């Protein structure tokens, strides 16, 4: 699962990785699959203000915020096949 590729900030090699992580969290949230809830919880627990330092800086504010909102959307949606809203 792609969500397992999302790591804590200190392990992020570049700004591109942050964008990839945001795209993965956003897309998984669109599917509203219950099986993604635990990984979204893990990502939501990251320190949103940690920084990779380096040339581009970057932080986890957007990624963590997306994970929180997407996880909330999974819990609130009526469940159909594969945990998707009908």
Image (cartoon, grey):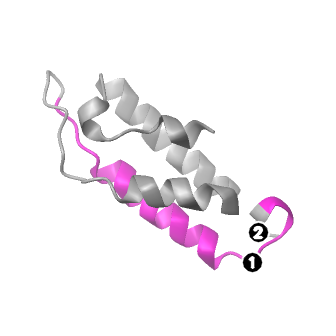
Disc 1 on helix, strand or loop?
A: loop
Residue 9: assigned label: none
The magenta stretch is: 57-82
Q: Are marks 2 and 1 in contact (CB under 8 Å)?
A: yes
Residue occupying the point 58% across, 70% down: 73
Report crowding for label 1: few under 14, some 14 to 19, many 20 or more residues within 10 A (C-alpha).
Answer: few
The tally of labels here is: 2
Q: What is the x, y in percent for residue 5?
A: 49, 34
Residue occupying the point 36% across, 55% down: 64
Task: Report the predominant secondary structure element of the magenta stretch.
Answer: helix
The C terminus, quarter of image: bottom right
Which label's residue is closer to the chain start, 2 or 1? 1
Looking at this view, name the residue that lies furthest to the right.
Answer: 81
Asked if residue 47 shows in the view, the reply is: yes
- Occupied quadrant, residue 2: top right
The N terminus, quarter of image: top right
Residue 78: assigned label: 1
**76 above or below 27?**
below
**31 above or below 5?**
below
Disc 2 on helix, strand or loop?
A: loop
Q: Is residue 79 magenta?
A: yes
Residue occupying the point 68% across, 75% down: 77
- Occupied quadrant, residue 42: bottom left
Using residue 81 as the reference point, say whether residue 18 is left or right of it. Answer: left
Instruction: Give the labeled residue for mark 2.
Output: 85
Q: Is residue 12 magenta?
A: no
Residue occupying the point 47% across, 61% down: 41
Report crowding for label 2: few under 14, some 14 to 19, many 20 or more residues within 10 A (C-alpha).
Answer: some
């Amino acid at each position: 699962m792609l969500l397992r590729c999302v790591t804590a900030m200190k392990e992020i090699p570049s700004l591109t990785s942050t964008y990839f992580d945001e795209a993965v969290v956003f897309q998984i949230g669109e599917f509203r699959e219950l099986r993604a809830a635990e990984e979204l919880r893990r990502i939501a627990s990251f320190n949103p203000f940690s920084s990779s330092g380096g040339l581009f800086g970057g932080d986890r504010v957007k990624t963590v915020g997306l994970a929180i909102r997407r996880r909330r959307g999974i819990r609130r949606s009526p469940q159909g096949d594969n945990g998707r809203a009908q």
